[in-house]
Image: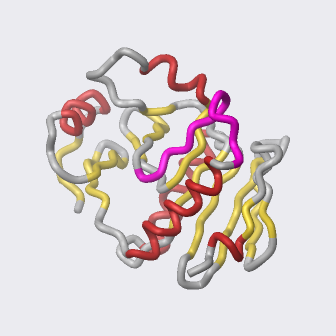
Amino acid sequence: MAVAQRMSEQAYQEFVLSGVEGRWELHDGQLVEKLGMSWEHDDLAERLGYLLRHQLDRAEFRVRVNGGRVRKSDNTVFMPNVMVVPTAYGQEFRGRPGILAIFAGPLPLVVEVWSRSTGNDDIDSKLPIYQQRGDLEIWRIHPYERTLTSWQRQPDGSYRETLHRDGMIEPIALPGVTIDLAELFAV
């Protein structure tokens, strides 16, 4: 559900921190509520978060599942389903209870899980923003087709797209991390 009134990021933060129910994003100044998701959607995001957390050094990275925020500009704030955040990015938010942690710097991994309610529109609208932000790797996981599409940032700033149906995936910016698709999609 989109709300017609345009708002700034500051107004967005005040709105979210006011205690209003729901999960909200800001799309080019438009307040948009993230809809409820299916069992498979949320389960897949949680499972990926678990697999990442068990392979990453907590001193270097944090994994956020359905709870982190990224910004492109002052009027666009997204909540990816899963994201890996360098621990150092959190320093500016420590001890500031009235401020949302909204990350502007490029992330090593940003993940969107396909859902029936948002379909391809979610990734179609968010993928270009993640690429403009310079995020190093972007994944779209489809829980029903059992596919993972990755976009990996190349040295020239372009992105290489790869569709994975099985095997092991090694995120380019997370050395030593391997995600086994059979384990990720296990029922």
The answer to whether 94 appears left or right of 179 in the picture is left
Percent of width and height locating residue 185: 62, 76
Q: Quadrant of the C terminus?
A: bottom right
Q: Which of 148 and 125 is in front in this view?
A: 148
Percent of width and height locating residue 1: 23, 62
Report the residue that reaches farthest toward the bottom. 145
Please say if 5 is above or below 101: below
The answer to whether 185 appears left or right of 90 in the picture is right
Percent of width and height locating residue 146: 62, 80
The answer to whether 75 appears left or right of 133 in the picture is left
In this picture, which residue range is highlighted in magenta?
55-66
- State the residue at coordinates (65%, 49%): 54
- State the residue at coordinates (42%, 21%): 93
- State the residue at coordinates (60%, 23%): 88
Q: Which of 138 and 90 is in front in this view?
A: 90
Report the residue that reaches farthest toward the front. 54
The answer to whether 24 appears left or right of 154 in the picture is left
User: Could you say which quadrant of the image residue 74 lies in?
Assistant: top left
Q: Nearer the viewer, residue 125 or 117?
A: 117
Q: Quick check: is 61 in the magenta stretch?
A: yes
User: Could you say which quadrant of the image residue 75 lies in?
Assistant: top left
- State the residue at coordinates (15%, 35%): 18
Number of residue marks: 0
Scheme of colours in the image: secondary structure
Percent of width and height locating residue 132: 60, 43
Please say if 43 is above or below 6: below
Q: Quick check: is 186 in the magenta stretch?
A: no
